[in-house]
Image (tube, coloured by chain):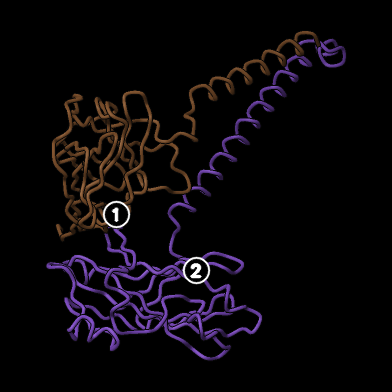
């Protein structure tokens, strides 16, 4: 029995082939599942990126040759109006809708590495509450509020950022008044080697 | 050996059959959304980012835009809506009117100030979309509202509102759409 099955391709050889087939099938299924899981994770991360770094107050972070810091978080039913808009609007303030507040976020950006071109420093600033709701800048009132002259991390159009010289980026949001104390600032960074999501907590 | 080859061919055929089956049942990502939520005027419908209610529908042969009357050889369909943004800002980029013949029309841009503006969470907007369709095309028309475009949205649902239009002649006289408005809701 032993001799026949071992060397002449009897039942044991057939059994080994069967086991090999099953192992190959199992390996194929495991491989397909692993690839599928990896793809699903990549898609989920792309759609809902997770926070890479959380900064509190005026903490500073340097990523790919650029430093970022939250240096302003002002809010209220009214915010001061730009001087050149005062006469046009006949008012000293810009007002939010009833039941809402304006939130002005000021980010200080500084090129610290000469190798990083300033025109590749892209940022998208939003605010988000603890329930996951997010707000974009409000262009209807935002441009009238006094503050930094630019809302772009590549700097003002007529004034290219220089290495070692910080500049301010300002964005204005309009949110329901009852969520103002709950919101944090989210900054999506791109243009360099990687993409990053910063959470900036004003308090 | 023959048995192994036969088994292998069967396995291959089975795998190909599985792939063919998955291809058949998978949605076509080029024509989102795959599913429609059917509504009528006055009913609120909710999809990923938006809750929308069509509050009234009118038809007219002429409308006023910036004090100028604009007359159509077809029909203007004037759709008033109230919309909430639920999670993210919504700019209503995917809104169309679909006729019974499956022709689709975009809102006319002359009345952009009447259209619901960018609406953010916690706010509600009231606005009006105006479509121009050939005479007789309004009968049985539906309003289609889809979620905001994103990177992967082939599996999303959309709202399909039966506007309740029966082909009656449009109202005489020119309609004058109001500007859109926004207020805080929560």
Where, quadrant-wise, is the C terminus of chain A in this rendering? bottom left
The subunit carrying tag 1 is B
Relative to B8, B53 lies left or right: left
Q: Estimate the x, y position of residue A7 in percent, counting from the top left.
A: 87, 15
Question: Where residue B63 appears, x then y in whole percent?
Answer: 21, 46
Q: Colour of chain A?
A: purple
Q: Name the residue under label 2.
A: A189
Helix, strand or loop at label 1? It is loop
Q: Is residue A151 left or right of residue A38?
A: left
Separation of residues labelled 2 and 1 (CA atoms): 33 Å
Q: Which of marks 2 and 1 is in front?
A: 1
Disc 2 sits on a residue from what chain?
A
Q: Are tags 2 and 1 found on a single chain?
A: no
At 87% from the left and 12% from the top, the residue drawn is A8
- On screen, residue B28 above or below B68: above
Q: Quadrant of residue B94?
A: top left
Q: In this view, does A157 lie above or below A127?
A: below
Chain letter corresponding to the colour brown: B
According to the image, label 1 marks what residue?
Answer: B112
Nearest the camera: B58 or A161? B58
Residue B83 at least partly seen: no
In the rendered view, tell whether residue B112 sits above or below residue A34.
Answer: below
Q: Which residue is drawn at 35% across and 44% down?
A: B147
Which label was assigned to residue A99? none
Above or below for B50 versus A173: above
The quadrant of the picture occupied by the N terminus of chain A is top right
Q: Position of residue A37 (x, y in %)?
A: 53, 42
User: Which secondary structure lies at badge 2?
Assistant: strand
Q: In which quarter of the image is residue B57?
A: top left
> How many residues crowd mark 2 within 10 Å: few (<14), some (14–19), many (20+)?
some
Looking at the image, which residue is at 37% across and 26% down? B102
């Amino acid at each position: 029995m032993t001799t026949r099955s071992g060397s002449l391709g009897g039942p044991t050889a057939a059994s080994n082939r069967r086991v090999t087939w099953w192992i190959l099938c199992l390996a194929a299924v495991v491989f397909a599942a692993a690839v599928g899981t990896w793809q699903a994770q990549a898609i989920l991360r792309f759609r809902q990126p997770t926070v890479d770094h959380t900064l509190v107050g005026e903490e500073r972070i340097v990523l790919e040759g650029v430093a970022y810091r939250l240096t302003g978080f002002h809010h209220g039913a009214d915010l001061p109006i730009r001087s050149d808009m005062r006469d046009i609007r006949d008012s000293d303030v810009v007002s939010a809708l009833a039941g809402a507040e304006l939130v002005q976020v000021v980010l200080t950006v500084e090129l610290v590495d000469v190798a990083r071109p300033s025109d590749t420093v892209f940022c998208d600033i939003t605010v988000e509450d603890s329930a996951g709701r997010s707000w974009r800048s409000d262009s209807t009132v935002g441009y009238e509020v006094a503050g930094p002259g630019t809302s772009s991390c590549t700097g003002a159009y007529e004034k290219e950022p220089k290495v070692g010289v910080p500049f301010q980026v300002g964005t204005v949001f309009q949110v329901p008044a009852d969520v103002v104390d709950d919101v944090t600032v989210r900054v999506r960074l791109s243009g360099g080697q990687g993409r990053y999501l910063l959470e900036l907590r004003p308090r | 050996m023959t048995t192994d080859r036969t088994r292998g061919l069967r396995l291959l055929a089975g795998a190909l059959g599985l792939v063919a089956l998955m291809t058949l049942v998978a949605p076509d990502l080029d024509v989102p959304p795959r599913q429609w939520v059917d509504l009528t005027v006055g009913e609120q419908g909710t999809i990923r980012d938006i809750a929308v209610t069509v509050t009234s529908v009118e038809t007219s042969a002429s409308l006023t835009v910036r004090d100028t009357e604009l007359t159509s050889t077809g029909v203007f369909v004037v759709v008033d809506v109230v919309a909430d943004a639920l999670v993210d800002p919504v700019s209503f980029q995917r809104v169309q009117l679909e006729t019974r013949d499956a022709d689709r029309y975009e809102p006319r841009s002359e009345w952009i100030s009447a259209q619901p503006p960018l609406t953010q969470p916690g706010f509600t907007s009231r606005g009006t979309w105006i479509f121009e369709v050939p005479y007789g095309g309004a009968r049985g028309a539906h309003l289609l509202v889809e979620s905001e475009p994103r990177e992967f949205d082939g599996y999303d649902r959309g709202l399909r509102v039966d506007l309740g239009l029966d082909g009656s002649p449009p109202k005489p006289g020119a309609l004058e759409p109001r500007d859109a408005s926004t207020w805080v809701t929560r």
